[in-house]
Structure formats: C-alpha cells, structure tokens
C-alpha cells in the first residue's frame, strides 16, 4: 500500500506535461556533468544563503543560529540531485519539503524566488566553464527540474495547509471547497467592480484632457 506522500507525489507529477517535467534525458545530462556540478557546491551554498540572509522577509523565517544546519541540508540536496537517482524517494522528498515549508513559514514566492536565483547562478557558472552552448543544454535540464520540484513543493504546501485546516476546524473537504469557491467568487466580483470604476474614472479624465 502506498503512503499518502507517495500518492500525492504521483498525483502532482501526472498533472505536469511531459515536455515540461524533468525526464530521463535531463537526468542523463546532469549525471554526465556531475563532477563539475559537485565542484560548484560550496560556492552555490554560500551564495544561496548569503542571498537569503540579505533579504529581510527571508531572513525572518530563519533562526539566527540555524544557518549551518540549513547549509548542510542544501549540500545534501545538491549532492543527491547531482548524483541521482531521480526515483520515487527523491520526488517524494520534494513533496516533504512543502510540508516543512508550512511548518517554518516559508512562502511559495520565497521558494520560487530562490529557484530563480539558483538558475541564474548556474547559468553564469556553467557559461564560464563549459561554454554558452553546453550551458544552455544543462540549464534546460535544470529548468525542467525547477518546474517539477516547484510543482511538487508548492502543491504539497497547499494540500497540507488545507488538511491542517480540515483537521482543526472539523470541516469536510467538500464544505471547505464550497467556502473557498464562495469567497473566490466574492473577491472576483469585488475586483471586477473596482476595475470598472477605475476604467470609468480614467475614461472621464481622458475626455476632459
């Protein structure tokens, strides 16, 4: 019998278009460059957490004495990512990250922003070491990895957040869904009304001018 985390992992992966998700060709390319990529580890980890601690909202979710432990976790992730394998255990680990993010208050924009930093950093370092053409190929694989991991982590974040709400409130999933839909419809209507009023004012001003 599959665990709930494994089932959630499979559900999320199946929703991703095959052309967008990380695949066997991507894994092979990362494996081919594994020696070089492992050499990047120390500089990548240093830059990653320098960026986090330089940004107040990100720094606020970190404990002042936990940088060393967090750096160790990132090193472990990088080593596992570069050396593989990209199996069920690896992808389920990324889903678990979403649960950890809920616990520590790491928001999805923070996670996505740091993925953007990672890809930019890799592009610069790869271009300097293997040339622009090969760097573009490798970055393509890491972009597929980013899409896949972000999907797993962000959807896991949402799913676990909703489960916590269900357990603490006692609401059935269907009732919670109806409440969410009702609130969304109200927000959409308020937004449409606000936009219509803004367009009316802009129209009047343009007529006067």
Image (cartoon, rainbow, N blue to C red):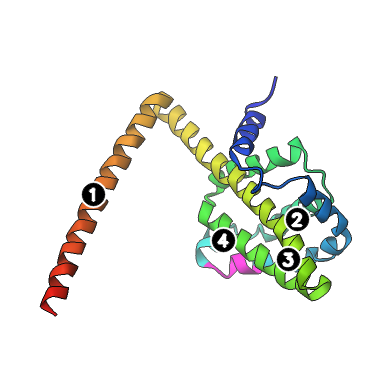
Looking at the image, the residue that sits furthest to the left is 208
State which tag comes first along the sequence, 4 or 3: 4
Numbered mark located on residue 113 in the image: 4
Residue occupied by mark 1: 190
**Element under disc 3:** helix
Q: Is residue 116 above or below residue 124?
A: above
Q: In the image, is residue 119 part of the stretch drawn in magenta? A: no
Q: Earlier in the sequence, mark 1 or mark 2?
A: 2
> How far apart are labels 2 and 4 at the CA level?
20 Å
Asked which secondary structure carries label 2, the reply is: helix
Q: Mark 3 near mark 1, Cβ–Cβ under 8 Å? A: no
Confirm whether the magenta stretch covers residue 52: yes
Residue 136 disc label: 3
Q: Residue at x 54, y 57 (%)?
A: 110
**Is 87 displayed left or right of 181 in the figure?**
right
Q: Quadrant of the C terminus?
A: bottom left
């Amino acid at each position: 019998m599959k665990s709930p985390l494994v089932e959630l992992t499979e559900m999320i992966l199946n929703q991703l278009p095959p052309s967008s998700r990380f695949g066997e060709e991507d894994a092979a390319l990362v494996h081919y460059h594994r020696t070089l990529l492992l050499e990047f580890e120390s500089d990548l980890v240093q830059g990653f957490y320098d960026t986090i601690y330089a940004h107040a909202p990100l720094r606020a979710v970190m404990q002042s004495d936990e940088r060393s432990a967090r750096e160790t976790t990132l090193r472990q992730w990088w080593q596992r990512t570069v050396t593989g394998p990209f199996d069920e255990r690896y992808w389920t680990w990324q889903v678990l990250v979403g649960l950890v993010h809920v616990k520590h208050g790491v928001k999805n924009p923070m996670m996505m922003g740091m993925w953007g930093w990672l890809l930019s950093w890799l592009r610069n370092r790869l271009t300097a070491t293997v040339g622009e053409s090969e760097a573009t190929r490798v970055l393509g694989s890491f972009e597929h990895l980013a899409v896949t991991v972000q999907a797993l982590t962000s959807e896991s974040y949402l799913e676990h957040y909703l489960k916590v709400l269900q357990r603490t409130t006692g609401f059935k999933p269907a009732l919670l869904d109806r409440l969410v839909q009702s609130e969304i419809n109200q927000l959409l209507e308020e937004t449409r009304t606000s936009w219509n009023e803004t367009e009316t004012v802009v129209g009047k001003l343009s007529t006067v001018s």
